[in-house]
Image (cartoon, helix red, strand yellow):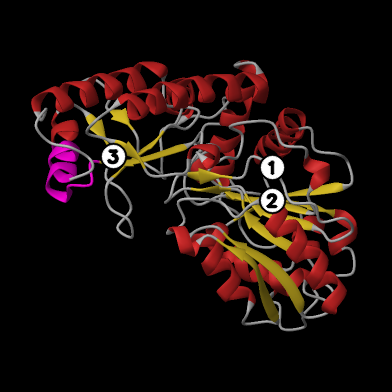
Amino acid sequence: MPRAHNFNPGPAALPVQVLEEVQAELVDYAGNGLSVLEMSHRAPSFIEIYEKAEETLRDVLGIPGDYDVLFLSGGATLEFAALAMNLMRTGRAGYVVSGHFSKVAMDEGARYGEAVCLATGEGSNFSAIPTKAEIDSAIVAEVAAGGLDYVHICQNNTIYGTMFHELPETDDVPLVADVSSCFLSLPLDVERYGVIYAGAQKNAGPAGVTVVICRHDLIAQGPALGICPAYLDWRSQAMKQSMLNTPNTFGIYVCGKVFEWVKEMGGLEAMEARNRKKASMLYDVLDQSKLFRGVARPQDRSIANVTFTTNIPELDREFVSEAARAGLVGLGGHRLVGGMRASIYNAVPKASVERLCGLMKEFEELHAGSSSTE
């Protein structure tokens, strides 16, 4: 049976090359006589796997030496709490609410201190990112009013298909970004951030691994809040090489292979070029269509998650069903917004996007009498 065209938002497509390497090594890794699934996290072979994964990620992303790299569990959602407990030293932090998960992050931060909403896209139903001018102005005002321990953004909004194309100016306030759905899809200037974190299950590996990259001076004192559980203490995790407890060994192993694949494919500049080309193909179809329309404001469109609709719920459902029958899976929109969503992460090949564009045109011809404005 041929592989499906996988547009799932996460867990998402993995490179076939990585899957095949994992398959070949599954029973016996590197002549050890056992699988990585069975290997002690203290074994020399696994320590080598871990160190290689970190080394490759540092190389690919250009992570400076004064940043710690952690491979944790619990997803980005657990880091919403870890962030506040590690960095909310004066008890006040700023949040840009650009979608569902950034709102969840702010609500979690409010459990531990004052979570200030700097700007929100709720008025547009999150189809647009708040403007840089609005965010920058709010940061200046809130720093003057009471200071901020950090400014948090969700850089790419998986559900709504929007993306920050310019970072806010935070001056001396650390910028913290949940980059789960755009991680490794384009270059990041790591030094612009105090903390970057990402669930691996979209571009970086399998579900169950969370990558946290944090500037060492921010965590050197230990957690800001005494209630911080040991597991969420970033300083302790950095000191223990993410092995305060048994980590997700197999997940880290697969992530390491994905990092190597990204490097082999030409690095993040090459990934960005590929992803922008795939996104442009889809957005061109949407912009020319009389049936489908894109949901996100054009200047805020994501290169990772393309959201669209016919504005006719029955037709949306029919299209998703027809796509599934044709081997295109994962195209249903999130339950909060409906419609369709194509997640076109690194491992989604151009051929899959071409097939989706073709199906959209075929579907429109079949429903020529319908209109997205009805």
Which mark sits nearer the N-terminus, 2 or 1?
2
Name the spot of residue 243 as percent of width and height, x first.
Answer: 69, 56
Q: Nearer the viewer, residue 294 or 334?
A: 294
Amino acid found under the numbered disc labelled 1: Glu
1 or 3: mark nearer the eye: 1
Q: CA distance from mark 2 to mark 1?
A: 7 Å
Q: Main secondary structure of the magenta part?
A: helix
Q: Is residue 49 visible?
A: yes
Which quadrant of the figure contains the C terminus? top left
Name the spot of residue 133 as percent of width and height, x first.
Answer: 72, 53
Name the spot of residue 213 as percent of width and height, x first.
Answer: 74, 49
Which quadrant of the figure contains the N terminus? top left
320 drawn magenta:
yes
Left or right of 261: which side holds 135? Answer: right
Q: Secondary structure at mark 1?
A: loop
Q: Is residue 74 visible?
A: no
Left or right of 230: which side holds 223? Answer: right
> Which residue is tagged 3?
331
Q: Are marks 2 and 1 in contact (CB under 8 Å)?
A: yes
> Which of the labelled discs sits on residue 166, or is there none?
1
Q: CA distance from mark 2 to mark 3?
A: 31 Å
